């Protein structure tokens, strides 16, 4: 009996061992048609895998799973064999659990989610150019796993040489995009659907993306260059068009004609099947790098149909940088900005491939930069929110529960790139013709990063010396052994605010290079100064500190953000003269250093304001006196600078100190008597 | 008989002797103001290689030659402008640094390596980099003597000039650095954070001083 029992245990163990693996690897998932009901799952043999198949179901109970079999197998570059299982008639908005099985048993557990068949919101990631730069490519892949998007749009140039060895490396690194989950006691990996694009580095084989990812956009069962373009109906919210910009090359004109005929036909027949339309292709119509030529052929093909059929967002690649454009409309052989509805173009690659100099801005470019990035897009019925995630490892990781609870949630601490005027998030809404309008808070609110005009430090010990452009940057200290007391003075160009009526938010950013645990104050500067001449003596020494706007402790190196929204500092500059601000110690003698505009990253003052102009640059040729008058007519926000009658006691905390220091601290307003008087005057004039 | 002897012996001898005397020399390229220098700091002929630097006899400057072998001199690597704590660190892309790359990284590695046995490698000034711009190139080629400076990109190359006022959409970033665009040889002012190419130079090289003037 014992012997039989032992044998049974051995057989069970053997079966368990067999069940733990299959001779397959490089699992990938793609979408090429209706994402709410179909998906293509691809994988490659890892050794000898005979007659592999897929078991799948809608719960983790494998006894209820079905089997699906390989629909086609493809060979890439003579070195990668891929098997593809096409799942169809899937339930919409549902988790699909699966394992690849073969003669060795079944492999790792995976799951993905089908797209919703209703207007539920979701997140997609869009980027391209993973061809080189493995370190940053992997960082991007790991970030993707933390974000847990519904799907990924890839703009092409998967590898550099389009060789089997490089594609194996790509597929190895793609495994970093899997998110790890424990579901019902089982270890699962979430895998994300990819919508692939043909890039110029795939040009030696125009069938690359169907050979590697199994897409069959035209549904003919064959893997051909015609599978480099097509549409994916993600949900009623989104239809994604994938196009092949390499068909502009010599010898591909018949394919180009077929593609462009299909595009117009599909946009006409099915474009309106979704609230939003995205396009992706590899080569930008107008690259933002002078080393790349414009692509007038692509412009002639697509710019007008995109406008005519309300393409909302176009994601381009190839150049290895980031850009955001205004909503644009084709105008002759170029674009022009429109505020009444057009197409927004974003890009341009750099998911690993070396960043290039962002040096070719157009009149309709909002901002651009040489960074490693992809776009993270929140899609909902009302709006698109487009962010640029700069690759690093600071982001938190979303759990499966986080994503289930909120289909739009994003991890905290993502290194979002902040575009001038727009900030970290570009919000698009639709006009009556379904074209994109950049919403700047919907009420005419604009974001600006005000440039620094003057920055310098002053020293009590060298009280007659000017330190403009000093290589040490900006310094502040209660008692420095060399300089004595140090203050930094910063002044910003306010001309962007000339047509604005109120400040909604104001955030000061200082790039800290030498941190301190002491408390520092941001003060209104009491009198005017110029960076090239100011000294400790010329501004009256410590009396240059007027009202305290805010306090902060620069405890970490890097960017220190100080919220000045309720300080009234900017309103004071506009009403009483732009004297700038003072960074001065409030306690202690542990100094802090910041970079200046001469030493690299200058201070930034990001302002969100209600302005009369929706988008585009504002008039600059306005004198200070003029806009002071303008503001006196329009200003509505009371100045809330803090007078500082009491000495700051670090032990009592800043909030307590402020409340003690101010007689009127009801709600969030802290008002100084003299500024209340000014506001009274301003409101009187406005009336 | 004498005539016969002359025809049999003297004439062939004379022809052979004349052929030897008038034999063309090994072909040599014309003297050029650029001279190839190898990693050991030795001067090479115009058709010799491999070479890691180029000496410009007109200026006495020794220039870095770019590669495509993913070493620190690979021509595809890009760098943000960062020197002596000024600029933006680590915003370009190379593969020889744990973080991303800036100009100081390339300078540090190149000086540590003593490229072509020379030290004091640095960013060129605007006037220095202008001396190697060549506008007689084939259309579409970088504006440089590509036979001596292979792997040159049609893009921006940093100079040592900084604190230059930015305009247009970059106005909010206030100041940046000067680069020279090897597409048309034009000067551009771009933000320090831009990822541009770099070709280092040194004015203190033994090799370049050995080059025949």
Image: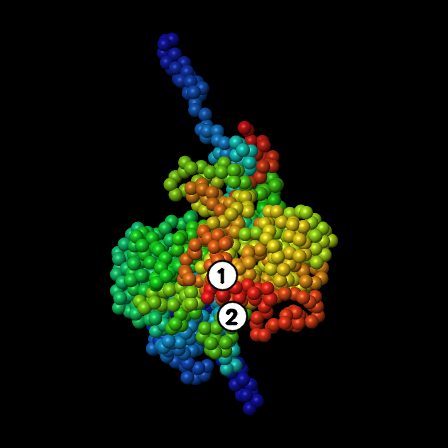
Quadrant in the picture for residue A347:
bottom left
> Which mark is drawn over residue A350?
none
Q: Which residue is mark 2?
A: A411
**Chain containing mark 1:** A
Q: Which residue is mark 1?
A: A632
Residue drawn 58% across the image and 31% down it: B210
Query: How far from the left and from the top, in percent, is residue A80?
Result: 41, 62
Quadrant in the picture for residue A667:
bottom right
**Chain containing mark 2:** A
Query: How far from the left and from the top, in percent, is residue A71?
Result: 34, 71
Q: Nearer the viewer, residue A455 or B65?
A: A455
Residue drawn 42% across the image and 52% down it: A361
A481 up-or-down from B206: above or below: below
Q: Nearer the viewer, residue A299 or A203?
A: A299
Residue drawn 31% across the image and 71% down it: A273
**From the image, which quarter does the N terminus of chain A lie in?**
bottom right
Residue drawn 43% across the image and 20% down it: B22
Q: Is residue B3 visible?
A: yes
Choose the circle earlier in sequence order: 2 or 1: 2
Q: Nearer the viewer, residue A667 or A252?
A: A667
Farthest residue toward the top?
A: B2
Marks 2 & 1 on one chain: yes
Query: How far from the left and from the top, in percent, is residue B77?
Result: 51, 50
Q: CA distance from mark 2 to mark 1?
A: 42 Å
């Amino acid at each position: 009996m014992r012997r039989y029992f032992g044998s049974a245990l051995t057989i069970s163990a053997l079966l368990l061992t067999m069940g733990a693996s299959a001779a397959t690897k490089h699992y990938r998932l793609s979408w090429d048609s209706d994402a709410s009901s179909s998906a293509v799952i691809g994988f490659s043999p890892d050794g000898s895998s005979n007659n592999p198949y897929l078991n799948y179901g809608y719960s983790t109970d494998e006894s209820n799973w079905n089997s699906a079999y390989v629909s086609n197998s493809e060979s890439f570059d003579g070195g990668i064999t891929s098997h593809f299982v096409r799942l169809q008639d899937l339930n919409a908005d549902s988790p699909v659990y699966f394992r690849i099985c073969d003669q060795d048993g079944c492999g790792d557990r995976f799951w993905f989610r089908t797209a919703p068949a209703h207007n539920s919101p979701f997140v997609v990631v869009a980027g391209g150019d993973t061809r080189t730069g493995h370190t940053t490519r992997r960082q991007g892949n790991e970030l993707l796993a933390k974000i847990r998007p519904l799907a990924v749009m890839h703009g092409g140039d998967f590898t550099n040489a389009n060789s089997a060895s490089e594609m194996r490396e790509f597929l190895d690194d793609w495994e970093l995009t899997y998110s790890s989950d424990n579901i019902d006691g089982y270890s699962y990996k979430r895998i994300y659907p990819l919508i692939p694009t043909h890039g110029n580095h795939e040009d030696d084989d125009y069938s690359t993306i169907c050979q590697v990812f199994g897409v069959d956009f035209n549904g003919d069962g064959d893997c051909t260059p015609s599978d480099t373009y097509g549409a994916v109906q993600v949900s009623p919210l989104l239809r994604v068009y994938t196009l092949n910009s390499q068909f502009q090359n010599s010898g591909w004109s018949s394919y180009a004609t077929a593609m462009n005929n299909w595009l117009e036909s599909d946009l006409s027949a099915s474009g309106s099947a979704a609230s939003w339309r995205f396009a992706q292709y590899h080569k930008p119509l107008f690259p933002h790098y002078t080393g790349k030529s414009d692509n007038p052929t692509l412009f002639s093909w697509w710019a007008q149909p995109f406008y005519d059929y309300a393409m909302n967002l176009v994601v381009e690649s190839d150049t290895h940088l980031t850009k955001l454009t205004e909503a644009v409309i084709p105008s002759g052989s170029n674009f022009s900005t429109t505020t009444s509805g057009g197409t927004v173009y974003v890009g341009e690659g750099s998911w690993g491939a070396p960043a290039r100099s962002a040096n070719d801005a157009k009149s309709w470019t909002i901002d651009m930069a040489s960074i490693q990035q992809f776009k993270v897009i929140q899609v909902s019925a009302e709006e698109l929110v487009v962010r640029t995630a700069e690759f690093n490892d600071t982001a938190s990781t979303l759990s499966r529960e986080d994503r289930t609870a909120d289909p739009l949630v994003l991890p905290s601490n993502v290194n979002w790139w902040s575009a001038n005027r727009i900030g970290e998030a570009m919000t698009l809404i639709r006009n009556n013709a379904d074209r994109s309008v950049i919403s700047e808070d919907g009420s005419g609110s604009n974001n600006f990063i005000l440039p620094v005009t003057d920055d310098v430090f002053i020293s009590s010990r060298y009280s007659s010396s000017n330190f403009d452009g000093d290589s040490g940057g900006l310094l502040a200290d209660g008692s420095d052994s060399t300089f004595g007391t140090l203050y930094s003075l910063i002044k910003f160009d306010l001309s962007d605010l000339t047509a604005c009526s109120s400040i909604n938010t104001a955030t000061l950013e200082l790039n800290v290079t030498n941190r301190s645990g002491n408390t520092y104050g941001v003060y209104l500067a009491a009198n005017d100064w110029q960076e090239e001449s100011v000294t400790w003596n010329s501004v009256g020494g410590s009396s240059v500190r007027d009202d305290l706007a805010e306090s902060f402790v620069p405890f970490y190196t890097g960017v220190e953000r100080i919220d000045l929204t309720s300080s009234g500092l900017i309103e004071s500059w506009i009403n009483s003269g732009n004297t700038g601000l003072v960074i001065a110690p409030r306690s202690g003698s542990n100094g802090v250093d910041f970079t200046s505009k001469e030493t690299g990253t200058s201070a930034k003052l990001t302002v969100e304001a209600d302005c009369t102009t929706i988008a585009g640059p504002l008039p600059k040729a306005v004198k200070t006196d003029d806009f002071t008058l303008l503001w006196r007519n329009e200003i509505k926000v009371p100045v809330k600078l803090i007078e500082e009658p009491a000495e700051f006691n670090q032990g009592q905390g800043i909030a307590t100190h402020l409340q003690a220091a101010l007689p009127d601290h009801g709600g969030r307003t802290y008002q100084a008597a003299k500024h209340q008087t000014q506001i009274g005057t301003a409101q009187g004039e406005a009336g | 008989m004498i005539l016969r002897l002359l025809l049999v012996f003297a004439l062939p001898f004379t022809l052979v002797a004349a052929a030897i005397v008038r034999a063309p020399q090994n072909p040599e390229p014309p003297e050029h103001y650029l001279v190839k220098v190898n990693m050991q700091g030795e001067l090479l002929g115009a058709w010799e290689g491999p070479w890691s630097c180029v000496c410009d006899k007109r200026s006495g400057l020794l220039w870095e030659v770019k590669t495509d072998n993913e070493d620190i001199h690979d021509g595809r690597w890009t760098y943000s402008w960062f020197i002596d704590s000024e600029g933006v660190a680590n915003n370009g892309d190379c593969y020889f640094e744990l973080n991303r790359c800036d100009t100081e990284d390339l300078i540090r590695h190149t000086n540590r390596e003593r490229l072509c046995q020379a030290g004091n490698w640095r960013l060129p000034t605007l006037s220095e980099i202008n001396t190697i711009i060549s506008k007689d190139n084939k259309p579409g080629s970088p504006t440089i003597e590509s036979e001596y400076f292979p792997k040159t990109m049609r893009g921006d190359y940093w100079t040592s000039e900084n604190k230059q006022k930015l305009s247009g959409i970059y106005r909010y970033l206030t100041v940046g650095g000067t680069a020279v665009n090897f597409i048309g040889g034009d000067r551009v002012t771009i933000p320090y954070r831009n990822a541009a190419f770099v070709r280092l130079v040194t004015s203190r090289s033994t090799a370049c001083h050995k080059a025949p003037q």
